[in-house]
């Protein structure tokens, strides 16, 4: 368990994010962890070298609200999470639609399922 | 989108990294900039499933060649904290020395590329010639010029003996003189200032709110540097962040120039204060279940490692947030309003490292 962490739900994210911004906290990044059926998002904030964290768990088939309307820089981390974990965000400031790192036409599974990418039209090679 | 869309990158004569920016331009003025990435994405974080926690040290060192050692250091710091391993004091000082040498070589590399981007090729060659001394030090003390692989969980696997220490101190004096000799050409040249002063301005508030890191943040007046956390022997050698206040490309260049000289001094202090003793303790067993966030300062800024373990020999999750990942969103704000010809220098001014960003 991380020090200075708070568990939150989706409806509270933007409100608490705005509160953090108003209180002078800087968004460092967003980490995503695969919990099997669910994905856990950990928002890391910094102020005067101290860290605090907000934890949000998102269920299967759910979308998460984007924090980019509050912290613009969140768009890059959220797009990366979309690519790697297949989790969509609502209200992204810049939305790469799942193609931040990969080209359209490259079939892959999200990092949390552990499968390798399979190129469409090229020799297929599956990792066990 | 109105205006003309011009793709800047991923291949461009001035851009050292494979980053593409889709620039919406009207009458030579940039109206919008959208970054595109993915050219060097390797999925290194996913390797935690197939490489054990000790093997991952070699993986993270290969996230980037320029700041390789500090990736390895940060990873080792995280695992040491999780496993309750305390490296010997000599290892802490050696880690500072090698990390600051990495900072010197990275900043000299950037200063050279910066000069080259301005068309100042002789200054570029000058900086890279000075940088060769750092590469010689890496090769002599660690066995490799680029990926030095000195950090292990529990300390460092190499040492610097007394003869090497004196030789390195002598080279540091030479490098300091040579770097200072370039100050007038870099910071006080009319043509350099015309291309950089007032270009790509990031105010203090913007830099902070957008999550900028490193010289990009400190060039806008925010005195934050993760070395202030005092990890390794930074508290003992003494350290204050280098800050400029104008927030433009010139301020960011000046921060890196001053940090180069500061890092030379920090290496001197680390080598002068080297305590006797071992450089490594054995880290036995596997990391217990837990999670941790560790931060350090790369040449480009704040580096964050989030590590989650489940008690097995493989990590459950490794999340790496590199400084360029933090500095790309500020570009989206810096570029609009600039003339197209100013874009390459401003992009270069954040010192982009895309292999770090994409992993």
Image: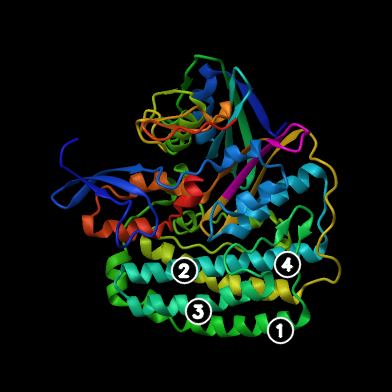
- Residue B346: quadrant of the picture: bottom left
Among the two numbered marks 2 and 1 on one chain, the one whose residue lies closer to the N terminus: 2
Of the pair A12 and A33, the residue shown nearer to us: A33
Find disc 2 in the rendering and name its residue: B109
Label placed on residue B166 = 1
Residue A59 appears left or right of B26: right
Q: Position of residue B272 (x, y in %)?
A: 74, 77
Give SS at disc 2: helix
Is residue B181 one of those drawn in magenta? no
Q: CA distance from mark 1 to mark 4?
A: 14 Å
Find disc 3 in the rendering and name its residue: B130
Q: CA distance from mark 4 to mark 3?
A: 22 Å
Give SS at disc 4: helix
Crowd band around label 1 with a 10 angstrom C-alpha radius: few (<14), some (14–19), many (20+): some
Whether residue B113 is visible: yes
Magenta stretch: dominant secondary structure: strand
Q: Are marks 4 and 2 in contact (CB under 8 Å)?
A: no
- Residue B35: quadrant of the picture: top left
Crowd band around label 2 with a 10 angstrom C-alpha radius: few (<14), some (14–19), many (20+): many
Give SS at disc 3: helix
| Both marks 1 and 3 on one chain | yes
Of the pair A47 and B303, the residue shown nearer to us: B303
Q: CA distance from mark 4 to mark 2?
A: 22 Å
Give the residue at x 67% y 50%.
B57
Find disc 4 in the rendering and name its residue: B94
| Both marks 2 and 1 on one chain | yes
Q: Which residues are magenta?
A: B303-315
Give the residue at x 43% y 58%.
B351
């Amino acid at each position: 368990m991380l020090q200075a962490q708070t568990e939150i739900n989706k409806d509270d994210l933007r409100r608490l994010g705005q509160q953090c911004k108003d209180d002078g906290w800087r968004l460092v990044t967003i980490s995503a962890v695969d919990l099997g059926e669910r994905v856990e998002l950990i928002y890391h904030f910094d102020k005067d070298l101290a860290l605090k964290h907000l934890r949000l768990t998102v269920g299967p088939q759910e979308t998460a609200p984007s924090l980019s309307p509050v912290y613009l820089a969140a768009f890059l981390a959220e797009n990366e999470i979309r690519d790697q974990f297949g989790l969509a965000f609502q209200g992204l400031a810049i939305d790469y639609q799942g193609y931040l790192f990969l080209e359209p036409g490259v079939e892959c599974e999200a990092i949390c399922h552990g499968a390798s990418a399979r190129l469409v039209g090229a020799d297929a090679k599956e990792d066990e | 989108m109105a205006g003309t869309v011009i793709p800047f990158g991923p291949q461009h004569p001035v851009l050292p990294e494979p980053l593409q920016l889709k620039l919406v331009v009207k009458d030579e003025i940039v109206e919008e900039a959208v970054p595109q990435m993915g050219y060097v994405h390797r999925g290194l974080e996913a390797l935690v499933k197939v490489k054990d926690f000790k093997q991952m040290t070699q993986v993270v060192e290969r996230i980037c060649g320029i700041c390789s050692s500090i990736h390895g250091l940060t990873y080792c710091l995280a695992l040491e904290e999780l496993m309750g391993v305390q490296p010997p004091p000599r290892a802490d000082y050696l880690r500072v020395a090698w990390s600051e040498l990495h900072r010197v070589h990275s900043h000299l590399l950037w200063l050279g590329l910066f000069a080259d981007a301005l068309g100042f090729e002789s200054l570029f060659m000058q900086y890279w010639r000075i940088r060769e001394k750092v590469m010689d030090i890496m090769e002599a003390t660690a066995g490799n010029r680029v990926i030095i692989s000195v950090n292990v969980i529990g300390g460092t696997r190499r040492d610097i003996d007394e003869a090497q220490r004196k030789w390195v101190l002598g080279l540091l004096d030479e490098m300091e003189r040579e770097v200072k000799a370039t100050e007038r050409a870099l910071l006080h040249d009319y043509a350099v200032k015309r291309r950089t002063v007032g270009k790509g301005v990031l105010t203090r508030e913007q830099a902070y709110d957008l999550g900028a890191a490193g010289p990009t943040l400190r060039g806008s007046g925010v005195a934050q540097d993760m070395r202030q956390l005092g990890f390794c022997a930074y508290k003992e050698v003494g350290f204050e962040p280098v800050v400029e206040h104008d927030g433009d490309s010139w301020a960011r260049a000046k921060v890196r120039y001053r940090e180069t000289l500061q890092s030379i001094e920090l290496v001197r202090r680390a080598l002068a204060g080297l305590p006797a003793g071992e450089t490594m303790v054995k880290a036995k067993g596997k990391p217990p279940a837990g999670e941790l966030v560790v931060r350090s300062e790369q040449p480009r800024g704040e580096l964050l490692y989030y590590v989650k373990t489940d008690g097995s020999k493989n990590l459950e999750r490794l999340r790496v947030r590199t400084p360029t990942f933090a500095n790309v969103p500020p570009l989206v704000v810096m570029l609009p309003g600039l003339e197209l010809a100013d874009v390459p220098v401003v992009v270069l001014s954040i010192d982009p490292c895309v292999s770090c960003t994409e992993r």
